[in-house]
Amino acid sequence: MDASDDSPRDQLLVENWVAIAGMPKAIFGWPDWQTTSPRQRKIGQEAGESDQLVLSSLLLDDSGATLEGVELRIVVWRDRPLEDATALLQVENDGWMPISRLDCWPYSPHTNRYWRRLHQIPIVDGSHIHRTEDNARLGRKAFTASENLPSAVVVDSEPQSFRDMLRMVEFYFNIDGACDLPPPQWQERLI
């Protein structure tokens, strides 16, 4: 996987995504959390342990205009506060596709498949960021809707709260107002 293998069209796409990731952005409106299930539930069936809470927000550029085809999406587990939470900066490209990803409190480490080429550590343990500019060095094929971004680096400090995670979203994704997003309504487990 190498950026030099990209067609001129793919090179322009990737350059555009790098520009979107780097530009100042802001939250559009007042997004709210929604419950989703990776499996189908019957009508009236209670939410299960595998349910996720998802917050999606369109974004504004620094002039206040909506960035068409760009969104912030945050996904957490409904019954597992501060475990395996993900924030995605996504673009519309035949469906939503992440161009940057923040993983906080992951269950397993991330393996950098191209660590030698990118001069990164091979295994990233703990919270980490998949930066657009790092993955862009691998070319268009690094960005897919169905697979994780291949390159990640450790975040500056491990978040201690959901609010800390939102501060990281604001910093790494350059999104003003991310800290003001509402926290999810987690369902605590009874023991």
Image (tube, rainbow, N blue to C red):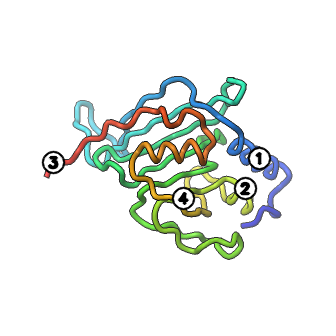
- Quickly name the residue at label 2: 140
Q: Position of residue 141 (x, y in %)?
A: 69, 58
- Quickly name the residue at label 4: 155
Among the two numbered marks 2 and 4 on one chain, the one whose residue lies closer to the N terminus: 2
- Quickly name the residue at label 1: 13
Instruction: Give the residue at x 64% y 73%.
Output: 115
Among the two numbered marks 2 and 3 on one chain, the one whose residue lies closer to the N terminus: 2
Mark 1 Cα shell of 10 Å, populated few (<14), some (14-19), many (≥20): some
Instruction: Give the residue at x 40% y 52%.
Output: 160
Question: Of discs 4 and 3, which sits in the foreground?
Answer: 4
Give amino acid for label 4.
Val
Is 29 situated above or below 55?
above
- Quickly name the residue at label 3: 190
Q: Secondary structure at mark 4?
A: loop
Give amino acid for label 3.
Leu
Give amino acid for label 1.
Leu
The part of the image, by quadrant, that contains residue 140 is: bottom right
